[in-house]
Amino acid sequence: MKLKYLNYTWFLSLLFCLSCNQSFLDPSNPAAIGSNDVWKDPKLIEMLVNDFYNDRPGYDYSNWLDNITDEARCNYPGFVPNRILVGQWDQVSNPIGFWAYTQVRKTNEFMAKIDSAPIDEPIKKRLKGETRFLRAFLYFDMVKRYGGVPIINTPQSIEDDLEVKRNTLEEVFDFISKELDIAISELPANAPRGRAGKEAAMALKGRALLYFASPLYNTTANNTRWEQAAKANEEIIKLGKFQLYPNLNSLWLDKSQAHNESIFEIQYRLPEKEHSWDAGLRPLRLANNNAGQMSPLQELVDAFPMKNGKSITNPSSGFDPKNPYVGRDDRFYAFIAFNGSKMKGTQTGPPVKEITLETYRGGLDYDSNPLWIIYNTKTAYYTRKATDPENTIYNGDRGSSQSWMELRYAEVLLNYAEAKNEFLGNPDASIYDAVNQVRRRAGITENLQTGSLDKNAMRDLIRNEKYIEFCFEKQRYWDVRRWKLATTLFNNRLYKGAVITKLGNGEFSYQYLPVDPQPNVFTERMYFMPIPQAEIAKNRNLTQNPGWN
């Protein structure tokens, strides 16, 4: 990576401003605003930080990550997720790579200039904290992919040695942790939704330390790292200001400041910034020029427990294989749309209509029309999670504005439970309490009793809770990698969907058959992604990850 000196004027986010007044700008000539002008005007400085927020990925390519795990599949054979599934990516082309030094450079230049800017000190302090938080996020997104990467935290010029070596993985995680500690001291508490406050920096630190403690990154099995991760997440719990949002169906739809689960989110606002979640996930009858993007797999469906909290494989759970969608926990009904369930949407615009899903053989939402098959589910399920049933304006790749909750309190609870369980010899009462909170919100009627599980059983339970609680939230791929289970779960496997047959008496029979046309590929070298070949070619000191030369 030869980081070339760039002469450029920062792109100012005129279309989507998170919290500033745009009236002072002349919208007819935004190009007249140069980089020197930015540092003369406090409002432009704030807009510059807004642009850093705008760089954060939200719903962007989320379907790619969810469709390359044991969560879901994309119906279109040649689409990116299906190529990744079979190992068709490398150092030349990596659709889920994140070599983010263009964004890092912008944050570095901001940090170098902000101290001398004509802006009130409290605002300056906040903007430094926000930028520091966002820069730490960039480094976290790189280290979880590549391992050690170069730490560059000052602006580079043409006179500098630009052939920068990689720092170690430990050094990068340490940099992230220390940057977030400073950000915590700079950021305000109770920041508006969509902006980083102290709590967001604390939550990101908790996530980063959890990764650092995990087997992929913790090759010496240093137990102290688990202790540090547990402590970081416990500090957020002890604040006592966050709670689990009570209604899973409106968790992503409530945009009020009173929302008490969201810690940090990427915001959208029509028509300036929008996404395609509502159009891409519905069946063709309701998809309005988009469909077939994410069909939940049978393995995910089977992971949801019964209302009593027991796994469907437990003989005492009450699960009935002839009625497999009866009696499951509330997350199942909020996240998964299945044969016979109701789904709302529109095909061409208002009004909203409600349909009963037909995902059986010959059903309207499965294979009744051979021309529709590629646009309908391939697993007999649709994704309901985070969709807006009252949205009437979605179309193709636009029309949705739900916020993307990147950090939410449910993750803090389960991160704490995971880290504390790994640190201790046996799970204590605080671990049971954290897990029970998440499960009670899911409508599970029976609490786990302290002492009922040993460390290994609790580990399996927490991992399953993460699987279902955060399905379709771009977490599963990274979790399975950091646990070093990807070569087991994502390699040489054929994942399944349901094949449902409607019987003459109106009942249904169920078969569970592979939907993957060929075995998935995840080899040992893929645990650390390749540094982009173009960066290797520019920098003689940038070493490639093992197995990618």
Image: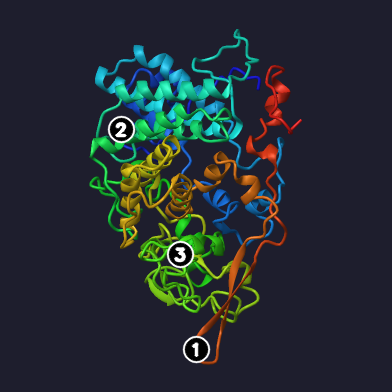
Q: Position of residue 325 (x, y in %)?
A: 45, 72
Residue 261 as seen in the image, left or right of residue 148: left
Packing grade of label 2 (10 A; few <14, some 14-19, many >=20) is: some
Q: Residue furthest top?
A: 159
Among numbered discs 3 and 1, the one appearing first in the sequence: 3
Crowd tier of the residue under label 1, counting other residues whose Cα lies within 10 Å: few below 14, some 14–19, many 20 or above: few
Q: Residue at x 50, y 47 (%)?
A: 474
Are dots 3 and 1 in contact, CB under 8 Å?
Answer: no
Q: Residues within 10 Å of mark 3 (few under 14, many from 20)?
A: some
Q: CA distance from mark 3 to mark 1?
A: 22 Å
| Left or right: residue 477 compared with residue 112 | right
Question: Quick check: can you spot residue 394?
Answer: yes
How far apart are the alpha carbons under marks 1 and 2?
Answer: 54 Å
Q: Secondary structure at mark 2?
A: helix
Q: Give the residue number, with chain letter if any, for mark 3.
A: 336
Q: Report the residue marked by disc 2.
A: 235
Query: Which callout, 1 or 2, points at the residue further toward the start of the chain?
Result: 2
Drawn side of residue 504 relative to residue 445, left or right: right
Question: What label does residue 136 carry, if any?
Answer: none
Disc 2 and disc 3: Cα gap in Å? 33 Å
Amino acid bearing label 2: Glu
Residue labelled with disc 1: 506
Does 84 appear above or below 297?
above
Between 158 and 301, the one lying in front of the other is: 301
